[in-house]
């Protein structure tokens, strides 16, 4: 996952951006771009403006996921940071919230004809994977509890190259197997939008085409007639 994400970021970084195409109205300064991007990442501003239903489900899923992941930090840290302890009770409800958001986003792919038409198998499978991760996680909490102390000992052991036994409950193995699958496909699927959004020209460009000539990086290597120097 780390190598794949680094590879994709390098690819995004070095892809030429030949045109000045900020989505208007766009900020006039670089500082404005930072604010615009922050609004987009923190509360999905453009989605809010375009579709309130999708926005609600997207926020439920992403905020739920964030809290769930913060709650999981306790399995990888010893001693546990105080703010991770504070997050714990919220993290449990966040598991439900995350799954509810995903079901809303998935329902839309069946119920809205236009969206159904553009949905591919991979869109459905990605949602199924995330829902199954959530449900297997919640089932470990409420249906068939696993030995969390042993899970933590295993992961701390992994970090320290001191391999410990992993409990073999089906729900834990399912949960971890699905998470591994998610980590493998992450860099090469649409999930790569997480770092990708920062490279979106329509969001990260300033509206200064009249003040400054836009020179794509590769144009510096061309002579005035378009030939290579
Ligand atoms: C190696 C990584 C992971 C490990 C070791 C792990 C382990 C666990 C364990 C042991 C539980 C049960 C918690 C309890 O009984 O209190 C759990 C719950 C859960 N997991 Fe994971 N998990 C991992 C990654 C993930 C990821 C990437 C997601 C989401 C995409 C996720 C979503 C959930 C959810 C929604 C719950 C139920 C709510 C909660 O207890 O926080 N897990 N996980």
Image: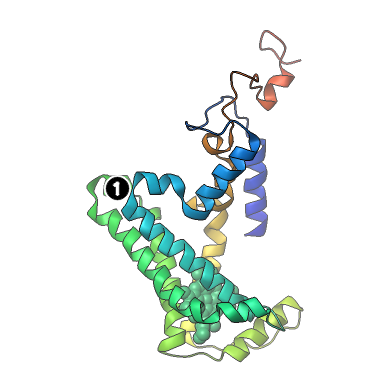
Q: Residue at x 24, y 51 (%)?
A: 112
* Total labels drawn: 1
Judging by the rendered image, the residue that carries numbered circle 1 is 115
Q: Viewer-proximal residue, 102 or 122?
A: 102
Q: Residue at point 39% right, 70% down?
A: 99
Looking at the image, the residue that sits furthest to the top is 225
Q: Answer above or below: position of 9 versus 23.
A: below
Q: Position of residue 215 (x, y in %)?
A: 66, 22
Residue lying at 54% horizontally and 57% vertically, measured from the top left: 186
Q: Badge 1: few (under 14), some or many (20 or more) residues near its Cα, within 10 Å?
A: few
Decide if residue 221 is on the left or right side of residue 126: right
Residue 117 rendering spot, x and y as whole percentages = 27, 45
Q: Position of residue 111 (x, y in %)?
A: 23, 55
Residue 19 picture quarter: top right
Q: Position of residue 189 (x, y in %)?
A: 50, 52
- The residue closer to the viewer here, 192 or 184, is 192
Q: Residue at 29% of width from left, 55% of height from top?
A: 108
């Amino acid at each position: 996952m780390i190598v794949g994400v680094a590879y994709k970021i390098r690819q995004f970084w070095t892809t030429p951006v030949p045109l000045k195409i900020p989505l208007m109205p766009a900020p006039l300064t670089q500082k404005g771009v930072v604010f615009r991007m922050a609004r987009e990442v923190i509360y999905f501003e453009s989605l809010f403006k375009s579709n309130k239903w999708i926005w609600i489900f997207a926020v439920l899923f992403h905020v739920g996921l964030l809290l769930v992941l913060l709650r999981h930090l306790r399995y990888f840290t010893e001693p546990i940071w105080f703010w991770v302890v504070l997050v714990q009770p919220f993290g449990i409800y966040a598991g439900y919230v995350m799954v509810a958001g995903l079901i809303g986003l998935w329902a839309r792919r069946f119920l809205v004809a236009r969206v159904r038409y553009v949905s591919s198998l991979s869109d459905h499978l990605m949602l199924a994977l995330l829902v199954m991760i959530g449900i297997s996680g919640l089932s470990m909490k409420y249906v068939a509890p696993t030995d969390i102390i042993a899970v933590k000992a295993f992961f701390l052991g992994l970090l320290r190259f001191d391999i410990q036994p992993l409990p073999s409950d089906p729900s834990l193995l399912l949960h971890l197997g699905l998470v591994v699958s998610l980590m493998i496909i992450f860099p090469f699927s649409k999930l790569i939008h997480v770092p990708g959004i920062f490279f979106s020209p329509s969001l990260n460009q300033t509206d200064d085409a009249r003040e400054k000539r836009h020179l794509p990086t590769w144009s510096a290597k061309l002579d005035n007639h378009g030939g290579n120097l």
